[in-house]
Amino acid sequence: MEEKNGIQKNLQVKTNSWYIILSISIKAFILTGCVFFLNIASAQTENASIQSWIKLNENKLIEEYLRFVSIPNVYGDTVNIRKNASFLIKQLTDADVSCKLLTSDVAGGSPAVYGEILTPGATKTVGFYAHYDGQPVNSKNWVSGTSPFNPVIMTDRIDNGGEIVPFSTSLTSIDPNWRIYGRSTADDKAGVMQIINAFRAIRETGLRLKINIRFLFEGEEEVGSKNLAKIFQKYQQDLKANIWVIADGPRHSSGKKQIVFGVRGDVNLTLTVFGPTRPLHSGNFGNWAPNPAMKLVQLLASMKDKNGMVTIKGFYDDVILFNESDLQAIKEIPNPEKSFQKELHINKPDGVGKTIFELYNLPSLNINGIHGGDIGQSAANVIPANATAVLDLRLAPGNDSEKQIRKLKQHIELQGYFIIDRDPTNQERDQYANIIRINVTGNSYNAQRTSIDMPIATDVVRAVQTTVNYPLILIPLAGGSLPLFLFEKYLNAKPITVTAVNYDNNQHAENENVLIGYLWDGIISMAAIMLMN
């Protein structure tokens, strides 16, 4: 009987214990849920305040942005690069941001613009990066009657019959579907503008920050961020952050906001195949003198199969494959390929049936251009003396730039070529049947990827998610390249990219443009991140 009573008491104690644990768990769940929904409601109220600020200041914002875009920003134009940096220093100073120029101590190098806001009691620091330099310009094919650095507002895309809207600060309203045309309107002065004005909106609406903020605006991204590593090493203490948010690149082709967790690396090479020491008459010497243009295209053709897959030995071997979270994110991305095929009139894409997002996780080999002899009205019946191709190798996570170059060179040697890094001597021409000059151009860098599951990255996703009423698109790896591995290597911090502009923005080409509504959306996204816990 005593044993039975003891058992009953133990059962009662255990039952009471489980009841207490269950009650606490339910209360904690309810409390957590309440906090979650309160946080969402608070974030949406903050977003509405930012939106109202934009509406109130849209004329001023556009006027300032037109002035910013009108400053030429091509690397090497030292005077105008400095004018861009001075413009940004003034913008930050006017917003009460402590700021300064960061220099690499390299002659002719572009300064980076740095700013910081320290929040009392904050335990997290978020960095915001964009670049103010742009691609070289060719005015020949730009918007009729304008130059690349004379930005104009248009009612629609040029190819859709868009018309120029004369801008005045007295405009009663600005249509978010209008576009601003001009170099770097999208890539990447848009990102700079969104970051700075997100903070201005927070400051002027009286909203409260809970994190520290660092700003970094670079002036050499379009030439491979050639001195960014030196800046990171020199100012390492200033640039410490838990995560860096990169404002760059286009949103999904559907127009939905997306966050990108990695970028491919990049290597550019120039290949020149040599033939006779001077151009030769194609009748007198045809069938006898080897044609370097023919040899070059045959060599290039040996590098890929009919499905566009690279045949160079070991080219794909080092790739770090997507994990389950990455693959699940890819499944949820709206597939743009059918619309791309229709828009670009591509009958059959490369890639052996893989989606475009799966192919981003593979290294690529692209021929940017080929030159041998002349075409059109300058064409002549000759065997050219040499032929040149420029190659662009995109690198996936796991690839090393130097190793990828070695694989390419080994493939070329197997095709019977003698490789040099200068023009051949006559003795070398006499000794070798096939000679190729290979030069690495620009600044090569590796890929970088941040885990989708990283806690602070999840905080950023949650913050941006409060700005839209559809699920954000999460991209494990982008097809393009940025030197983001430098943030990891020198600052010990992971970057993620919150894309800023419309996908049809013509970046790097003539008639670059940005949708005004996307500028506003970007300000709201950046402000939401700055206001997160």
Image (cartoon, rainbow, N blue to C red):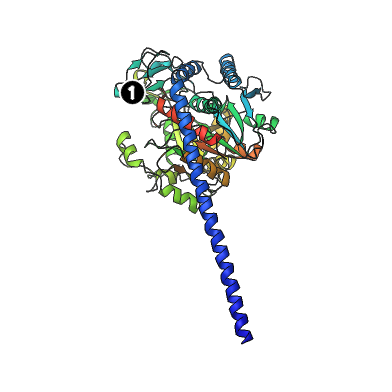
Residue 55, picture quadrant: top left
Residue 178, picture quadrant: top left
At x 45% / y 22%, what residue is drawn?
A: 56
At x 60% / y 29%, what residue is drawn?
A: 215
Question: Looking at the image, is 63 positioned above or below residue 186?
Answer: above
At x 56% / y 67%, what residue is drawn?
A: 18
Residue 210: x %, y % from top left: 60, 36
Q: Work out which quarter of the rendered image holds the C terminus and state it.
A: top right
Q: How crowded is the residue under tag 1: few (<14 C-alpha within 10 Å), some, or many (20+)? A: some
At x 57% / y 20%, what residue is drawn?
A: 91
Judged from the image, the secondary structure of the residue bearing numbered disc 1 is loop
The answer to whether any part of residue 457 appears in the image is yes
Q: Is residue 146 left or right of residue 347?
A: right
Q: Is residue 379 left or right of residue 483?
A: left
Residue 198: x %, y % from top left: 52, 28
Residue 478: x %, y % from top left: 47, 40
The answer to whether any part of residue 515 appears in the image is no
Q: Which residue is mark 1?
A: 156
Residue 186: x %, y % from top left: 45, 26
Residue closest to the eye, 444 or 462? 462
Q: Identify residue type, mark 1.
A: Asp
Q: Is residue 187 left or right of residue 208?
A: left
Question: Looking at the image, is 377 positioned above or below residue 481?
Answer: above
Residue closest to the eye, 439 or 349? 349
